[in-house]
């Protein structure tokens, strides 16, 4: 008998492995392999479940850590009262349900999307959900990972399953070599600029091409992290030898004979060579320069050597009005070069860019230099482990000597849920993922960029092209 | 558990700017805590609705009559993009919104709407723009009718548009079904899947325990 398998994508292979039941047009009940909880929504979900007289279906597949609402000051000083209450509630409710929690000051604590891969909880081919839209980050390991809302979170706690409609598939191929000063963050920002903030809505995006294969795993996590900023709830990259090397030996990764079995299964996951995608985009990586946003959506992005757009040059009135609104909010002059725009704040951190390689890149720029007068610059490591590894390398000293503040791990100023904000009207260069109105604080102005660009801007006191700093 | 939704005829407010994200719909600090529901309506669209001194911004549509009483929003592309915060939907619900008609929605926001008995309807951009123009022409007095069972939208001038909706979602809203209880009826299937999967992919089920 001829066994002809349809040409399948990475997404289809992972998806099909998780189908518990087919329940409607393109809609399946899928098994959830890992459910990650954080302080903002974790205890709320567990209490919701309790109020309905239900219990956690699989506590052993559920893991929790505080990251959103805790202070990142030394000793967690100044954690807001409600943040303390959420932390206490997360401790009580996870303990009552038998869920493992990685608590503050313990190895394992950190931003939920940093610790999943770091602990080996996130694995190729596994299905991961979390009540946070940046769950797509874990796709960098070849996992199918996506953010869910509070109601879905309760559903997953109660059933260990999630109802999902199969998304369309897009492949974004990054071909070519990254030039000096260009990072994973720049690649994904360039893609968002190209397809727009809704370009990936309804799709799962597979990132492929030579530049993706060349990227180390932490860079791939950064790429997948910003999937949601192009509208795609899911973004993923086929696992390869680098992935297995990264996962091997991590605390929760399989070992011994089970490891061998797992890798054999993971090797079958990459899309078949003749797999068909609903949409294909090709990005010429050779042409990409460091990117920086100028507006209030991640799609408002230009090369660091570019000019702020001038609304008068746009014929479409809707487009023109949108640019005017953004420039008015950002306090930028139409047509002016973005480089040289004075900054008040620099934030290096978030689930996008707070891993060891990000901190190394920023430290390389900061080394032997000083943060410009009048600029406040923070480095917030993504996890307790990242922090300890960075300290072991002396990166904290490099930052402190340069005038950066070295902080405790957490989400911090990416979304300012813990009260760490950029004040109204002030301008920040941030390695995070959203430049939305008020994201870093009411009326705060955010420019998204890579860790290298952020560090260079801290040193220069203005948005800076890292390639122009003396080497 | 969502309230059932079937038919609605109501005042509609057009908010046509692209990429209104869920941070703009509700700021994160309003959502920190386990007892925020019921406090959010006042803070929906705060950055657009209020001036820096806290007073109402008269230029914002939801501060004007009759739009203050709107139960339907007509929205621009990519409404509700960004964060997964379900509080965005809760805040709109507390504002009295029951249906949102737009040319595109953030995927997670779209799913969160159904979980709360709010009907998001995707239409072509021309239809959304046309509805907005008609509403503005009547200065908001012209109501929009939504019929979920018949899958139609009727504009203030009486033009009827058919809309598509996932049949499962449609029944869920019409009947106000509780998804958790529905899925728990399939618990035998979930457990059977897990029993078989433990052999197929033991590394998933024995995380950190090398059985």
Image: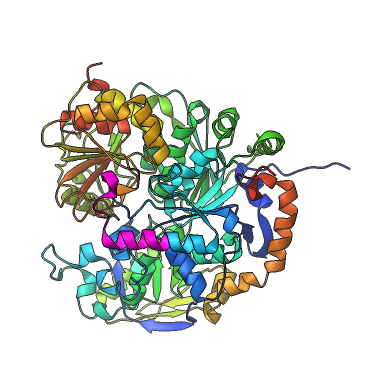
Of residues A280 and A427, the one drawn nearer to the viewer in this rendering: A427
**Residue pictured at 35% horizontal, 69% vertical:** B74
Q: Is residue B195 left or right of residue A398?
A: right
Quadrant in the picture for the C terminus of chain A = top left
Residue A72 visible in rendering: no
The residue stretch that appears in magenta: A72-90
Q: Position of residue B180 (x, y in %)?
A: 57, 71
Is residue A158 positioned above or below A232 on the image?
A: below
Of residues B139 and A323, the one drawn nearer to the viewer in this rendering: A323
Residue A239: image quadrant is top right
**Residue pictured at 34% horizontal, 63% vertical:** A85
Of residues A50 and A345, the one drawn nearer to the viewer in this rendering: A50
**Colouring scheme applied when the structure was drawn:** rainbow
Is residue A443 positioned above or below A457 on the image?
A: below
Residue B22: image quadrant is bottom left
**Residue pictured at 21% horizontal, 62% vertical:** B47
Residue A248 visible in rendering: yes
Question: Would residue A73 be counted in the magenta stretch?
Answer: yes
Q: Is residue B193 left or right of residue A238?
A: right
Quadrant in the picture for the N terminus of chain A = top right
Q: Position of residue A314 (x, y in %)?
A: 24, 46
Residue A304: image quadrant is top left
Looking at the image, which residue sits at the far right?
A1
Secondary structure predominantly adopted by residues drawn in magenta: helix
Q: Is residue B197 left or right of residue B52?
A: right
């Amino acid at each position: 008998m001829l066994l002809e398998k349809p040409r399948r994508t990475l997404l289809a292979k992972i998806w099909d492995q998780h189908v518990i039941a087919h329940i409607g047009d393109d809609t399946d009940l899928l098994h959830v392999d890992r459910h990650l909880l954080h302080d903002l929504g974790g205890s709320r979900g567990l209490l919701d479940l309790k109020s309905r007289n239900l219990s956690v279906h699989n506590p052993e597949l559920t893991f929790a850590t505080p990251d959103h609402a805790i202070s990142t000051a030394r000793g967690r000083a100044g954690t807001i009262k409600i943040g303390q209450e959420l932390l206490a509630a997360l401790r009580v409710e996870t303990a009552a349900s038998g869920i493992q929690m990685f608590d503050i000051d313990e190895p394992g604590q950190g931003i939920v999307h940093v610790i999943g891969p770091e602990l080996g909880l996130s694995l190729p081919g596994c299905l991961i959900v979390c009540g946070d839209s940046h769950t797509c980050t874990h796709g960098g390991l070849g996992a199918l990972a996506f953010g869910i809302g509070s109601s879905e979170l309760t559903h997953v706690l109660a059933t260990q399953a999630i109802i999902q409609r199969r998304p369309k598939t897009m492949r974004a191929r990054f071909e070519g070599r990254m030039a000096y000063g260009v990072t994973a963050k720049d690649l994904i920002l360039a893609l968002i600029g190209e397809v727009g903030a809704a370009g990936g809505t309804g799709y799962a995006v597979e990132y492929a091409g030579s530049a993706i294969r060349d990227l180390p795993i932490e860079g791939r996590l950064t790429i997948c992290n910003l999937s949601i900023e192009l509208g795609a709830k899911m973004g993923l990259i086929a696992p390869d030898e680098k992935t297995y090397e990264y996962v091997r030996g991590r605390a929760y990764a399989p070992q011994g004979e089970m490891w061998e079995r797992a890798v054999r299964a993971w090797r079958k996951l990459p899309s078949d060579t003749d797999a068909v995608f609903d949409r294909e985009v090709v990005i010429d990586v050779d042409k990409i320069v460091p990117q920086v946003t100028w507006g209030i959506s991640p799609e408002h992005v230009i090369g660091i050597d570019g000019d702020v757009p001038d609304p008068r040059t746009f014929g479409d009135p809707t487009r023109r009005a949108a640019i005017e609104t953004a420039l008015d909010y950002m306090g930028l002059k139409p047509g002016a070069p973005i480089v040289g725009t004075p900054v008040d704040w620099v934030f290096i951190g978030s689930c996008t860019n707070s891993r060891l390689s990000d901190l190394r890149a920023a430290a390389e720029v900061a080394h032997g230099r000083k943060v410009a007068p009048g600029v406040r610059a923070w480095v917030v490591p993504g996890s307790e482990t990242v922090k300890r590894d960075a300290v072991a390398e002396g990166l904290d000293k490099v930052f402190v000597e340069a005038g950066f503040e070295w902080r405790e791990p957490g989400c911090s100023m990416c979304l300012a849920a813990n009260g760490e904000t950029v004040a109204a009207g002030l301008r920040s260069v941030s390695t995070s993922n959203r430049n939305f109105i008020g994201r870093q604080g009411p009326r705060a102005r955010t420019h998204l960029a890579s860790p290298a660009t952020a560090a260079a801007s801290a040193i220069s006191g203005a948005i800076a092209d890292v390639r122009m700093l003396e080497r | 558990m969502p309230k059932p939704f079937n038919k609605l005829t109501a005042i509609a407010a057009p908010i046509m700017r692209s990429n209104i994200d869920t941070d703009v719909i509700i700021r994160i600090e309003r959502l920190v805590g386990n007892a925020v529901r019921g406090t959010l309506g006042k803070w929906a669209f705060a950055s657009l609705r209020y001036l820096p001194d806290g007073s109402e911004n008269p230029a914002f549509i939801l501060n004007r009559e009759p739009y203050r009483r709107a139960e339907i929003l007509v929205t621009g592309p990519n409404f509700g993009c960004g964060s997964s915060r379900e509080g965005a939907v809760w805040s709109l619900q507390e504002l009295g919104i029951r249906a949102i008609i737009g040319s595109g929605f953030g995927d997670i926001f779209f799913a969160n709407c159904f979980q709360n008995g709010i009907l998001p309807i995707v239409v072509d951009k021309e239809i959304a723009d046309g509805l907005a123009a008609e509403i503005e022409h009547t200065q908001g007095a012209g109501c929009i009718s939504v019929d979920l069972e018949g899958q139609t939208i009727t504009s203030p001038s009486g033009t009827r548009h058919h809309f598509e909706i996932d049949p499962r979602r449609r029944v869920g809203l019409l009947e106000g079904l509780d998804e958790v209880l529905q899925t728990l009826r399939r618990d035998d299937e979930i457990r059977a899947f897990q029993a078989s999967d433990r052999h197929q992919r033991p590394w998933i089920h024995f995380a950190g325990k090398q059985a």
